Image (spheres, rainbow, N blue to C red):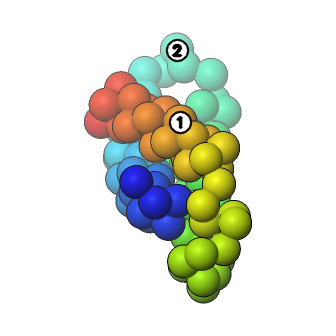
Amino acid sequence: MEAVTLAWIASALSAVLALAASSVSYAPSVPRWIPVALPAISSAMFLFSTAGAIALGRLSPGHRIRQSRSLRFMLAVVVLLALVLVVLVG
């Protein structure tokens, strides 16, 4: 997969995670910072991955950053982690 596609998938998954995390009701025994931190972190992840996808999309298809294997690997790991969080929270 291309880096731009992976960045857009990460953006979509983090948006779903932000919505799911904000709609979950937490037990009273949960520390007070968790219901605030999880939606905030996933919302920040959504903003950064969307900005990254837009920036990568503006580069030419032959640009070395878009062809980088390490960037694609890193984005694939982010997508997998976001997918695991969506499954666990949602």
- Count residues near mark 2 (Cα–Cα under 10 Å), then give few for <14, some for 14-19, many for 20+: few
Q: Nearer the viewer, residue 83 or 31?
A: 83
Position of residue 23 in the picture relative to residue 4 (left or right): left
Between tags 1 and 2, which lies in front? 1
Q: Earlier in the sequence, mark 1 or mark 2?
A: 2
Residue 18 visible, this angle: no
Q: Nearer the viewer, residue 82 or 41?
A: 82
Task: Give the x, y percent position of residue 46.
Answer: 54, 60
Q: Residue at x 46, y 60 (%)?
A: 2
- The quadrant of the rendering that contains the C terminus is top left
Q: Residue 58, located in which quarter of the rendered image?
A: bottom right
Q: Residue at x 52, y 59 (%)?
A: 3
Under mark 2, the amino acid is Ser
* Position of 9 relative to 27 (above/below): below
Q: Which residue is mark 1?
A: 77
Q: Residue at x 53, y 36 (%)?
A: 77
Residue 58 visible, this angle: yes
Task: Give the x, y percent position of residue 40.
Answer: 61, 51
* Position of 50 relative to 71 (above/below): below
- The quadrant of the rendering that contains the N terminus is bottom left
Task: Give the x, y percent position of residue 83.
Answer: 38, 37
Q: Which residue is mark 2?
A: 29
Furthest-top residue in this view:
29
Under mark 1, the amino acid is Val
SS at circle 2: loop
Q: Which disc, if any, is residue 62?
A: none
* Position of 79 relative to 68 (above/below): above
- Count residues near mark 1 (Cα–Cα under 10 Å), then give few for <14, some for 14-19, many for 20+: some
SS at circle 1: helix
Position of residue 45 in the picture relative to residue 28 (left or right): right
